[in-house]
Image (cartoon, rainbow, N blue to C red):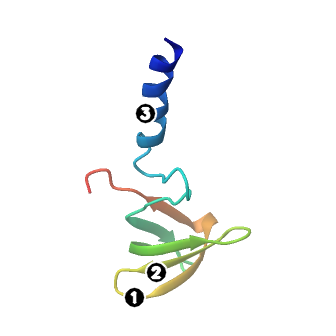
Amino acid sequence: MKKLILLPILALAISGCGNLDMFDTNFTYHYAITRWPDGTVKKIEIKQWADYEGEQIQIISTDGTIYLLSMNNTVLVRDCRK
């Protein structure tokens, strides 16, 4: 009886995280909103990203531009409609 209850809970826990791959801990984001030193705000469409030790993040945009940013000035956004 306990196995019948545990199996659906385990299946839900593994598959219920659409934004997180349970084994690689990869997160998927569609765009980033960044604040620049001159005060402007820019939206960047994300092709690939990586975080580093501390508070740095590298974003490769869909047009191929590579950004090295501070996480203090960056918000990563996942669009649930995509």
- Measuring 73% from the left and 68% from the top, which residue is drawn there? 54
Q: Is residue 33 left or right of residue 68?
A: left
Asked whether the residues under the numbered discs 2 and 1 touch, taking CB atoms below 8 Å apart as contact, a structural biologist would say yes
Identify which amino acid the numbered label 1 is placed on. Answer: Gly
Residue ID at (34%, 86%):
63
Which SS class for mark 3? helix
Q: Secondary structure at mark 1?
A: loop
Q: Position of residue 23 (x, y in %)?
A: 55, 54
The image shows residue 57 at horizontal and vertical percentages of 60, 73
Name the spot of residue 46 as percent of width and height, x first. 40, 72
Tell me which label, 3 or 1, sits earlier in the chain.
3
Residue at the image point whose x is 42% and y is 26% from the top: 8
- The image quadrant that residue 25 belongs to is bottom right
Question: Which residue, given by chain and number where applicable, does mark 2 sit on?
Answer: 60
Residue position for label 3: 12
Q: Mark 1 packing: few (<14 Cα in 10 Å), some, or many (20+)?
A: few
Instruction: Establish if 67 lies above or below 41.
Output: below
Q: Are marks 3 and 1 in contact (CB under 8 Å)?
A: no
Give the residue pinned by disc 1: 64
CA gap between label 3 and label 2 equals 32 Å
Taking depth in this image into account, of 19 and 72 the one nearest to the observer is: 19
Mark 2 residue type: Ile
